[in-house]
Amino acid sequence: MEELANLFHGFAVALQPYNIMLMIIGITLGVVIGVLPGLGGANGVAILLPLTFSMPPTSAIIMLSCIYWGALFGGAITSILFNIPGEPWSVATTFDGYPMAQQGRPGEALTAAFTSSFVGALFAVIMITLVAPLVAGFALRFGPAEKFAVYFLAFCSFVGLSKEPPFKTIAAMMMGFALAAVGLDSITGQLRLTFGSTELLNGFDFLIAVIGLFGIGEILLTMEEGLAFRGGNASINLRVVLQTWRELPAYWMTSLRSCLIGCWMGITPAGATPASFMSYGIAKRLARRGNNFGKGEIEGVIAPETAAHAAGTAALLPMLSLGVPGSPTAAVLLGGLLIWGLQPGPMLFVEQKEFVWGLIASMYLGNLAGLIVVLTCVPLFAAILRVPFGIIAPLILVLCAIGAYSVHNSTFDVMLMLVFGVLGYLLKKCNYPLAPLVLAIVLGDKAEEAFRQSLLGSQGSLGVFFSNGLVSTIMALGLVALFWSAIQEGYSRLRMSMA
Amino acid sequence: MTEQSESGPAHKTLEMGMALLIGAFGLVVIFGSIKAGINWGAEGPRAGFFPFYVGAAIVVASAINLWSARRDDDGRRFAAWGQLRQVMSVVVPTAIYVGSMPFIGLYVASMIFIAWFMRWLGGYRWLTVTAVAVGMPVVTYLVFERWFLVPLPKGPFEEWLGL
């Protein structure tokens, strides 16, 4: 019951006029970011993060998380109307969304996508409301060994669940850890890996990495492909919306399944993109009209959109309750918390009640506001896409430079951003995943600290990670996740030899 | 991957180069960690302890990536030369833009950069080019410096304007 009271208090915070204004601004910016190529949720939030330094933390997180919701909504617009996924998690939406638009049903597809996104998010927020305080309460008892085990599990899940080759994931992730280690060592106060450079004293800021890897890298990829938009007209009127809404309840089973997939994939750091593909794949296999998938089936829009939005929202659960972000964007938000002087993790629920519950309440309101904004303003956002890339690209590059500069007021960071951009382009082309790299930069110091503190307590024995039931279970889960692809392969070989 | 007729570097070459590059990075990390001390000191594991194993993992993973890149050659091209020229036509000016920023300030650099990009890569009329190239920095100034009080780098031109 105490949670309910806290939640109502949170609503009171989120409903202040100033915060509502920030919410609408955030959603609108977020949709624009989601629609434009080269500006994604993660680096959109990263660029705008410096603008929030002077705001109260609760207002800041409300605006930034709304940018995130907006980006999640926005990705669907370009997928359906232009067959160009604005975000990686909306790739699966193009499969059926674009055919629907071509058959003259863009309004229907967009309504289905937005409504499903909303349903997915709502499901995930309710889950966060109910589960997050419990997880946080549980995690309060964690010592350094358990903390490290949670990080271990998070990073191992990347290796096991990502579709990229496992050793590429490991290489990318370890590069992140190495970059995080550069500079002042937080425990001994000693300098390391700086090689005498004064610019590297403070190490690499992950915001610079995010803006470079995701922003600049994405622009370079787009340049290579040579962009030409051929999009249909977008119009949504009330009649289409209401008609689609009448149709949607028939697909409740698909929705529910996608919500569950999304929540699960969001909490484990697999993220929204695999969630949307998995949900689409399962829906295709189980749906009565599964053979029609890919030709403009409304169920093929519902499934990935619900899962992607549920995953995107659920990614905030581990960030809030454990301090382990479930996605790159959640990682950027976590970085924001650190900058505002808040310690992410279970203590937030004890010490910063107003902040946590204000954020959770704003998730309910922000997604509702998002649904209204996108349903009413689709033609406007589609028009943005018709601004040619020759104008958009330099503006985005300048925005990225401004964002990178304002993190530490340093022009060195801007150059670093460009280096990360070229690196991001090459890594992406060679199929290295970027998300674990970014997450490792964010969490590297904390993971290392937990690791060294545990070893300090045990006099250097690795047995500390298997010293009690809890920590052994988490570590064992991590190991299973780490070797998941090998286990799967072994299992299928075993079945082959049995048959 | 679009037109097979156009030539370009092989994907395999780049893949191997990338693995070598990351491996070399791993070696640098190992070297730096050893310099910082990888054994136990009075305060427990020393500063290089954790990064040393991270560097070792990078080297091992890169070796495996290099091996598998050598093994499965699917004959794909990395990109056509024309595509790479497109990419370089963004990278080079951006590098100049970024490099000139400490000297002429962000605003003037952005104006020149936007104008160059739109005129040479986009082929727009000078009127459109000027409107966007001047408009964007002005809007940026109002939003960042006036509204959110975030200072951006300025050069001699802004000083002359007295901003």
Image: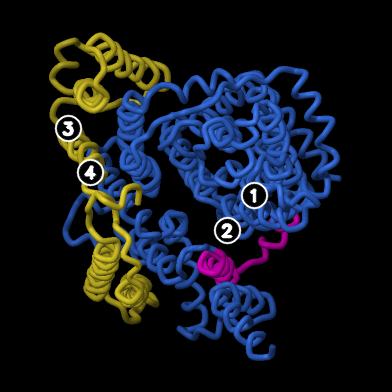
Residue A192 visible in the snapshot: no
**Residue numbers of the magenta segment:** A134-161
Q: Earlier in the sequence, mark 1 or mark 2?
A: 2
Q: Quadrant of residue A473 in the image? A: bottom right
Residue B127 visible in the snapshot: yes
Q: Residue at x 68, y 48 (%)?
A: A293
Chain bearing mark 3: B
Which label lies toward us, 4 or 1? Answer: 4
How crowded pointer 3 is (Cα within 10 Å; few <14, some 14-19, many 20+) is rated as some
Residue picked out by circle 4: B82
Residue picked out by circle 1: A311
Chain shaded blue = A
How crowded pointer 1 is (Cα within 10 Å; few <14, some 14-19, many 20+) is rated as many
Point out which mark residue A278 bears.
Answer: none
Identify the secondary structure beneath mark 2. Answer: loop
Identify the secondary structure beneath mark 1. Answer: helix
Work out which quarter of the rendered image holds the N terminus of chain A and state it: top right
